[in-house]
Amino acid sequence: MSAILLAPVQLPFRALAETFVPELAHCAPAEWESLVDIVENALLARPPAMRRQLLLFVRILDSLALLRHGRRLAALDPARRGAFVEAIGNAPVLLLRRGVWGLRTLVMMGYYTQPDVQATLGYRASARGWEARR
């Protein structure tokens, strides 16, 4: 699958993803494509209205960064981008906090569910439970 849903916001989404999981700044193209596929598959299971809201939220964050720092998310250095996202994530407006946590959850799902990442981390969970480790 190619990035269909996230294509309109690919640069700000990537910048946000690298903010949530800094290791993504140096990931291989295949690892990034896998993350996008996982996220898009999860989004396809959601109603169209929710998908539109997510894309709109990414655009709003990108615009807010432009207003506050004079640069879009992808152009901000990692420290400034991290502080910006943290400020939005701690905003008094519940909808903004939920939006940041939702995006973070999608990115982490897309990254940490990849078999190569799990192997690198030493994650050995099994459907057989503790029995599999014996």
Image (cartoon, rainbow, N blue to C red):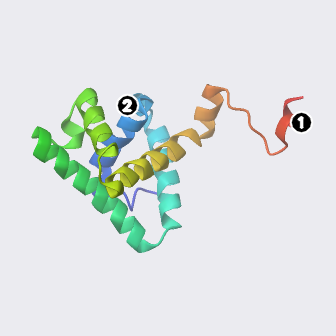
Q: What is the total number of numbered labels drawn onto the structure image?
A: 2
* Quadrant in the rendering for residue 79: top left
Which mark is first along the chain, 1 or 2? 2
Residue type highlighted by circle 2: Ala
Residue 47: give x, y in percent of width and height.
46, 72
- Callout 1 amino acid: Glu
Residue at x 47% of width, y 50% of height: 106
Quadrant of the rendering where the C terminus is positioned? top right
Residue 40: mark: none
How many residues crowd around disc 2 within 10 Å: few (fewer than 14), some, or many (20 or more)? some
Left or right relative to 134: residue 55: left
Furthest-bottom residue in view?
48
Question: What residue is disc 1 on?
Answer: 131
Name of the residue lying farthest toward the front: 92
Q: Are marks 2 and 1 in contact (CB under 8 Å)?
A: no
Asked which quadrant contains residue 24, the reply is top left
Q: Is residue 21 left or right of residue 67?
A: right
Work out how far the residue at label 2 is from the one at label 1, CA to CA, in angstroms: 37 Å
Number of other residues with Cα within 10 Å of mark 1, as a class: few under 14, some 14 to 19, many 20 or more: few
Asked whether 20 or 14 is in front, the reply is 20
Front tag of 2 and 1 = 1
Instruction: Identify the secondary structure beneath mark 1.
Output: helix
Q: Is residue 39 above or below residue 107?
A: below
Residue under the point 17% across and 51% down: 63
Task: Give percent across and percent down for residue 19.
Answer: 35, 35
Q: Secondary structure at mark 2?
A: helix
Residue 110 at x, y percent in the picture: 51, 46
The x and y percentages for residue 52 are: 35, 67
* Point 63% across, 34% down: residue: 118
Q: Which residue is mark 2?
A: 25
Residue under the point 58% across and 33% down: 117
